[in-house]
Image: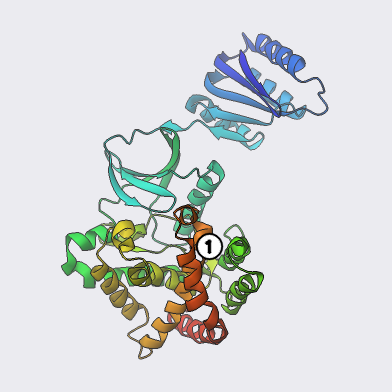
Amino acid sequence: MIFSKSENQLILYFTGRIDSANANGVDNEIKNIITENIPDLSHPPEVIFNLKELSYISSAGLRILLNYRKKKLLSKLTEVSTEVYEILEATGFQQLIPTERALRSVDITGCSIIAQGGNGVIYHLPGDEIVKVYVNGTDMEDIQREREYARRAFLSGVPTAISYDVVKCGEYYGIVFECVNADTLSRLLMTDPSSLPQLAAEYAQLMLTLHRTHITDPQIPRISELYHSIADRAAEYYTPEEVELFHRLIRAIPERDTMVHGDLNSNNVMQQGSELLLIDMAEVSRGNPIYDLFSVYFVHVLNISFEPGAVEHFLKLSEELSRKLWDAAAGIYFKESKDMKRIESILKKLAAFRVAILPVLFRRIEQSGRLTRFTDYARKELFPHIPELEQEVKWLDELVRSLVE
């Protein structure tokens, strides 16, 4: 048996089988390694058993694992092989010891890119699957959280692609989803601009379905809390008085128990048959639909004038179609309200909030030397309007409530 050691961690690597014939010998090997490498057993480091190369474990082997767990000399099992994981699952053992299943490897060489966002790239795999590959150092906890959000959204009735498992794609991690047999909403529009009326109607209906979904699950974070956290982190770029203006605006948006996507743009929507599905659930939260509305307005409309070329680059959608998609979908969402000009005026000011916090969300903005463009825009287009926005969002909230409840 081999092992690796660091200041705070001891990893033991198991191979072959553990059964009644060799259980005692394996136990002795474990004891020797622990004795030689942990001087003070009352304050052990994190002890991990890596079961990637273990093909079988009997009840005798399970008793060994349980014994070390009881002695607090086994923190978790990692990279558990499929064969062994099935045994642990059948016996309920993975409920007794934190267990991480071995990830299958997925080769994305030569696979076509379907969509690309802030934290990942989505590839179409051979067969009936797609994979979202996280390319910006996203850790496993965040990936598992997104997968869980997608599961909860699906069970709540929100049209989402079904996630299968977490995989390895070279040096990166990914989530495999069912194949939706189509491209993103952006690509569908670019391929056939004449489909815009129908797709805009479906897009609006998807937003309404999402915003009519009420959720009180405490495991889903409140979007207001996420924005308050972002505002605190924005202190690196703004004065204390300006940060407080962020908080004032967030407090002005009434709390709701609606499901909110967080990044509901046309690149995060795909088609399955005649139904549109959400495929990126990293920012799912609960709160007021207004957050989704001004986020979509920013991506599809405000960004056209604020950063020319961004729509084509990020959404792979022409600026003309981006604007038309918003106009058509918003018209349906708001039931062709006679107050559309007022609605857009409010959303435009709120979208400036999204511009203001982008340096917090994407550090590459600071690194690119474009930081002042964002902070200057906030100081011109957002902060002076916050007193009036505190009143305007209450009016908009009542209007949205009448549409989704």
Residue at point 53%, 49% (across, down): 145
The one of 239 and 113 positioned closer to us in this rendering: 239
Q: Residue furthest bottom?
A: 338
Q: Is residue 189 left or right of residue 298?
A: left
| Colour mapping used in the image | rainbow
Where 226 falls versus 84 (above or below)? below
Count of numbered circles on the image: 1
Spot occupied by residue 188 in the image (x, y as percentages of width and height): 23, 60
Q: Quadrant of residue 312?
A: bottom left
The one of 10 and 77 positioned closer to us in this rendering: 10
Residue at point 48%, 83% (across, down): 396
Q: Is residue 235 left or right of residue 394?
A: right
User: Which quadrant of the rendered structure holds the N terminus?
Assistant: top right
Category of crowding for the residue at label 1, using alpha-carbon neighbours closer than 10 angstroms: few (below 14), some (14–19), many (at least 20): many
Spot occupied by residue 113 in the image (x, y as percentages of width and height): 29, 46
Where 134 falls versus 66 (above or below)? below
Spot occupied by residue 277 in the image (x, y as percentages of width and height): 35, 59
Q: Is residue 281 left or right of residue 255?
A: left
The one of 311 and 368 positioned closer to us in this rendering: 368
Q: Is residue 320 left or right of residue 121?
A: left
Q: Which residue is mark 1?
A: 285
The answer to whether residue 394 is seen in the rendering is: yes
Where 227 falls versus 84 (above or below)? below
The answer to whether residue 284 is seen in the rendering is: no
Residue at point 62%, 70% (across, down): 243
Residue at point 24%, 70% (across, down): 320
Q: Secondary structure at mark 1?
A: strand
Q: Amino acid at mark 1?
A: Ser
Where 372 falls versus 94 (above or below)? below
